[in-house]
Amino acid sequence: MTSPGALTGFPPSFLWGAATAAYQIEGAVDADGRGRSVWDTFSHQPGRIVDGSTGDVACDHYHRWPEDVRLMAELGLTGYRFSVAWPRIQPDGTGAANPAGIAFYDRLIDALLEHRISPMLTLFHWDLPQALQDVGGWLNRDTTARFAEYADILGRHFADRVDYWMPVNEPNVVTFFGHALGNHAPGSRLGLAALPVAHHLLLGHGLAVQALRTHGARRVGAANNHSPVWPASDRAVDVEAAAGYDDLWNRLFADSMLLGRYPQRYAERLGGRAEDLPTISQPLDFYGMNYYNPARTADVAPGQEQDSAGLGFRRLPIEGYPRTDFDWPVIPAGLTQMLGQLAERYPGRLPPVIITENGCSYADGPGPDGRVHDQRRIDYLDGHLRAVRQAIADGVEVAGYCCWSLLDNFEWAEGYRQRFGLVHVDYSSQRRTPKDSYAWYAAVIRQNRQNLQD
């Protein structure tokens, strides 16, 4: 196992975290008044999930959360990023809060605080109440008002105890995977006609920031997925395709939040709602960035097959790097590059950055000795933490890192085939087995905190 000995030198206040999402771990989809979400509907439709599974049980975190909090404490986390299931709070996406749902998160938050773990709450990690989808979902501007009401409920109940807030997780993924390409719930295939979804998610973000601040919420930020974009060649058409992809995947969401404007090439397609941009660009206390790998793009030439729903570019494989079991290239330098790019693009506007997700899927399970020897995950985390440290040395203010994920879980359209966890979950028995990477990450955290104490 790689020694974490040389992986020190992070800022004294650096937050050491891990992340999860409600639908991916909670299960208990019919418990205590929870309503249905778009992912309940989507996962039960034949052919939607690769292995035919659903999140009905997942990791049963709803019933096993005390064990999971104990694992977090033993890991040494100083922050835990989790999401609240909107249908657990408002079963139909509107109206009064469900007391049982509030009580569940009350218990979880209090337990985290007892172990000196900062609660990091995501309001929306993709589980829109199905009742709202039935009246248009994120294509319906009214959903932004419903989201603001939901944020008001969470702020009223939890603002006194939650340390970090993220209204919307990865609005670009929701827009394009869920509404442009149809790979995720709700499964729409709208191409660029999905862009109003992006606008409404961003407006919902801004309205939620306002609602949370009325209740004194501290450290309100974002959780955007970012990828540095590499042209497939130096041909002008490929460079232009890369610029278009960069605008669509990165700048559409960061420019609107941090600069109060949309990239020019997409502004008109977003409905011309310029009056909403001051709401979208509410000041943030931190900027959450999720990173997995760069994107290599090329032009779509006449006669070439394209699977990009008319978006004007093709995604191409990146060769020459190790690959995860998800077939994603492992490129830590891309994380340094993306952090530097954010700092360059938004001088004076970029608040401290927290890596709100970064991780890898490897299928290692318990061996004959009962342990999970996942050296590839250790190597991945080691490389990416060094990439963060390099960005800090380059002058980017990075305030924390959240490994994705604490637990193996339901990986959306991939079902249970992809394992991202520091902790292995046997889904038949719900047994948790900390992997070697768990012990390695605990040692990294412990050594950095010990150096602080010394």
Image: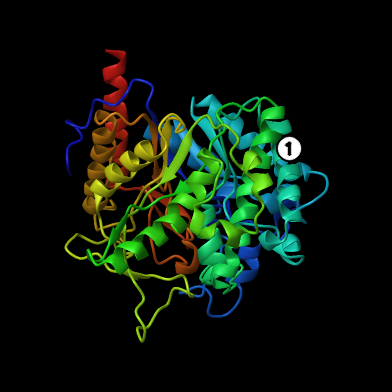
Q: Nearer the viewer, residue 223 or 39?
A: 223
Q: Nearer the viewer, residue 208 or 35?
A: 208
Q: Is residue 112 left or right of residue 329?
A: right
In percent of the image, x 73 and y 54: which residue is there? 143
Indicate how the structure is coloured in the image: rainbow
In percent of the image, x 30 and y 59: which residue is there? 362
Q: Nearer the viewer, residue 315 or 154?
A: 315
- 32 is higher (above) or lower (below) than 136: above
Residue 214 shows in this picture? yes
In terms of secondary structure, where does tag 1 sit? Answer: helix
In percent of the image, x 59 and y 62: which residue is there? 269
Q: Residue 437: percent from the left, percent from the top? A: 29, 45
* Residue at image mark 1: 152
Q: Is residue 293 left or right of residue 197?
A: left
Q: Is residue 440 left or right of residue 417?
A: left
Which residue lies most toward the top here?
Answer: 454
In percent of the image, x 34 and y 58: which residue is there? 361
Which residue lies most toward the right here?
Answer: 95
Q: Is residue 191 left or right of residue 404?
A: right
Which quadrant of the rendered structure holds the C terminus? Answer: top left
Q: Residue 328: percent from the left, percent from the top? A: 30, 62
* Residue count near mark 1 (Cα–Cα under 10 Å), binned few <14, some 14–19, many ≥20: many
Q: Nearer the viewer, residue 229 or 163?
A: 229
User: What amino acid is labelled 1 in the image?
Assistant: Asp
Residue 20 shows in this picture? no
Q: Residue 347: percent from the left, percent from the top? A: 40, 32
Q: Residue 133: percent from the left, percent from the top? A: 71, 64
- 142 is higher (above) or lower (below) than 309: above
- 314 is higher (above) or lower (below) than 424: below
